[in-house]
């Protein structure tokens, strides 16, 4: 049936309206989409570009070159050497075992190293490179490179690694570097991102540790493009970091090497200070160790050998070790009494071989006694009874205060590990630490550097320097940082009557240069280079009344660990002091026999800036000294003698 024309027209009008509505909606939607696209592509383009870049670009840190360390003459002590290593990427290698078999035919690859590499590869993603071997030679690298087609997944790389040119001679001063540990990170509040780099090395001991932030430098960066799973596709840019600052120490490596050689065979510490500026010229602990072992990876056998050695080669005895100073402390007791006005330098005190205090006998080292002695003779002959009497007059508090003025019982601020504070005890210290009252016997013991008194070789050298100059000499170890000299620390007058100091110096001169002095056998035989000094012997065991009655056992008849410590402090030249020295020989016996000869030889080496003439020694020891000099010269490294003076 045919529709009427009127119905047909109405239907067409309805369709037209719907078409317009739908079309309008479509146009509106398209317009909104266009506006949104315009906003994203034009107005928000930078935001989305950054988001895209962050998704595909990673920033990797580049470790900077560590700062170099030189001695005062410009001799390189700690440097960086190229470290050739080989890495392997598991996903590119295919059959890892087969590739390792081929690689082991080209380079040294132990079973242990191979097992460690396989374990690390199994614990990491297949696309992450793993170090197979490092510290390889150039010949090793070239062999691997030539055979690269047969070694899929293997890559040769070059980096920097620390090395110490002087080996053991400066190990306790410079220290060494090692990989960052969890313990290291736990001690740092806001760790440098560099420390998160696998196997990144930082200073562990010595100057390397204390000057870590100065030596480390700042990281560089490289931008790399990675795919969706993090695999590196290409390097986009690279910006090198800022290398660490170079340090120049006050140490004279030639003198340091000589002292290390002179102390060979002893468990000892020695320090030499320049009296003009407080610069430390030598800081030696013997025996020592090769710090390169810790950089390259120390074996269990090497570690056990160091750790089990009774001479404790890992201990920095010169600054860390503390010992009863023995008779080297007597100058402190005398100065305290002189300043307090309770002692006349010309007054004589009778030494009968012992002094009785509160029913206890305190013995002099000379059983028959020294007779009547004044201040000068008491130091020259090292009479103990003189100081037993003097100490009771002045009291421990004033003795301890004087000790601190001369650098004892004080921790000196140096960039070295475990610098000891020592101990200058007083009544308050014993009450606080021991919970006991101070006794007169404690004062008597302390007067001769026994009992609770403790000092390091560094502190004893500072004491000697301050006696020699009358100034508060302060030790300095860092001479320059990147060529800029570090400030010299103030050394004001020590505030004592100069006449008192002159008397002490004159007595120390007699110790070494008067034929009744305890160090006369170790004198310097050149008039304008005479050395003043003081010997010391500190007991490490108690001598009972029974043993004293039958005769005190000599050190030679005792086990090494029960023998007395031997000490010597001194300065030279007496008339115009240039250097101060302190030597402590653990369980060396008597200071005059064991420590004084070493101190004399070290002082001569410093004064002559090299090997002194035989005429500087007493005639009766020149033959032995000649042989000793030849033996030491054969040991001294040429690098420790050469170099331009940068001081």
Image (cartoon, rainbow, N blue to C red):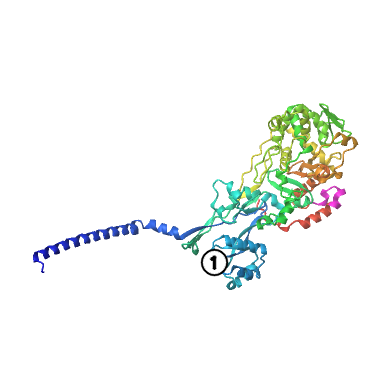
Please state the horizontal and vertical placement of residue 304, each as a whole percent of the image. Answer: 73, 53
Please name the residue that numbered disc 1 is placed on: 91
Please state the horizontal and vertical placement of residue 62, each as a whole percent of the image. Answer: 54, 58
Quadrant of residue 552 in the image? top right
Q: Which range of residues does the magenta coloring cover? A: 612-624
Q: Nearer the viewer, residue 4 or 567?
A: 4
Is 283 left, or right, of 123 in this rendering?
right
Is 71 left, or right, of 33 in this rendering?
right
Is 473 left, or right, of 334 in this rendering?
left
Is 414 left, or right, of 337 in this rendering?
left
Q: Would you place residue 34 above or below residue 269 in this image?
A: below
- Say which quadrant the N terminus sits in: bottom left
Quadrant of residue 342 in the image? top right
Quadrant of residue 24 in the image? bottom left
* Residue at the image point whose x is 60% and y is 56% from the top: 199
Please state the horizontal and vertical placement of residue 622, each as a whole percent of the image. Answer: 85, 51
Q: Nearer the viewer, residue 602 or 68?
A: 68
Please state the horizontal and vertical placement of residue 425, each as a whole percent of the image. Answer: 72, 33
């Amino acid at each position: 049936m045919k529709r009427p024309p009127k119905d047909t027209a109405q239907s067409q009008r309805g369709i037209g309206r719907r078409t317009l509505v739908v079309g309008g909606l479509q146009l509106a939607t398209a317009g909104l989409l266009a506006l949104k696209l315009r906003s994203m592509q034009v107005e928000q383009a930078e935001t989305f570009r950054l988001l895209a870049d962050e998704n595909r670009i990673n920033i990797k840190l580049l470790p900077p070159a560590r700062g170099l360390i030189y001695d005062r003459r410009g001799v390189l002590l700690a440097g960086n050497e190229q470290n050739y290593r080989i890495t392997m990427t598991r996903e590119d290698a295919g059959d890892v075992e087969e590739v390792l078999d081929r690689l082991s035919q080209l380079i040294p690859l132990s079973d242990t190293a191979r097992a460690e590499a396989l374990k690390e590869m199994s614990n990491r993603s297949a696309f992450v490179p793993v170090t197979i071997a490092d510290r390889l030679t150039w010949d090793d690298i070239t062999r691997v490179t030539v055979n690269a087609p047969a070694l899929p997944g293997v890559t040769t790389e070059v980096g920097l690694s620390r090395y110490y040119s002087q080996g053991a001679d400066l190990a306790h001063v410079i220290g060494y570097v090692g990989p960052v540990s969890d313990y290291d990170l736990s001690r740092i509040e806001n760790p440098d991102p560099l420390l998160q780099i696998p196997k990144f090395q930082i200073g562990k001991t010595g100057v390397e540790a204390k000057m870590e932030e100065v030596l480390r430098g700042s990281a560089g960066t490289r931008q790399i493009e990675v795919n969706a799973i993090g695999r590196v596709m290409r390097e986009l840019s690279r910006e090198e970091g800022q290398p660490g600052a170079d340090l120049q120490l006050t140490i004279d490596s030639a003198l340091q090497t000589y002292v290390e050689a002179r102390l060979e065979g002893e468990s000892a510490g020695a320090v030499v200070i320049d009296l003009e500026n407080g610069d430390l010229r030598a800081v030696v602990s013997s025996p020592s160790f090769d710090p390169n072992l810790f950089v390259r990876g120390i074996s269990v056998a090497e570690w056990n050998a160091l750790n089990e050695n009774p001479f404790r080669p890992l201990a920095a005895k010169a600054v860390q070790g503390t010992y009863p100073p023995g008779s080297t402390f007597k100058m402190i007791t005398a100065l305290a009494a002189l300043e307090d006005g309770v002692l006349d330098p010309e007054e004589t005190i009778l030494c009968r071989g012992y002094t009785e205090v509160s029913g206890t006998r305190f013995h002099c080292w000379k059983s028959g006694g020294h007779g009547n002695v004044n201040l000068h003779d008491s130091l020259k002959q090292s009479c103990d009874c003189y100081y037993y009497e003097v100490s009771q007059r002045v009291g421990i508090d004033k003795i301890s205060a004087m000790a601190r003025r001369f650098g004892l019982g004080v921790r000196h601020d140096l960039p070295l590990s475990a610098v000891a504070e020592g101990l200058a005890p007083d009544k308050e210290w014993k009450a606080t630490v021991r919970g006991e009252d101070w006794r007169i016997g404690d004062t008597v013991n302390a007067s001769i550097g026994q009992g609770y008194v403790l000092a390091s070789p560094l502190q004893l050298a500072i004491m000697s320097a301050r006696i020699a100059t009358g100034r508060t000499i302060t030790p300095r170890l860092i001479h320059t940082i990147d060529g800029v000299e570090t400030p010299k620390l103030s050394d004001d007058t020590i505030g004592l009557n100069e006449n008192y100091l002159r008397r002490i110096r004159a007595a120390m001169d007699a110790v070494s240069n008067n034929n009744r002095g305890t160090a006369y056998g170790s004198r310097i035989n050149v008039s304008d280079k005479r050395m003043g000094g003081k010997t010391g012997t500190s007991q490490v065991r108690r001598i009972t009344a029974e043993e004293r009655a039958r005769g005190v056992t000599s050190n030679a008849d005792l086990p090494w660990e029960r023998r007395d410590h031997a000490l010597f402090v001194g300065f030279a030249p007496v008339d115009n002091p240039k250097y101060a020295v302190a030597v402590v020989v653990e369980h060396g016996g008597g200071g005059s026999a064991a420590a004084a000869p070493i101190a004399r030889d070290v002082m001569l080496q410093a004064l002559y800036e090299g090997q002194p003439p035989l005429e500087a020694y007493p005639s009766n020891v020149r033959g032995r000294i000649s042989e000793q000099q030849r033996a030491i010269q054969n040991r001294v490294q040429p690098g420790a003698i050469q170099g331009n003076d940068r001081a």
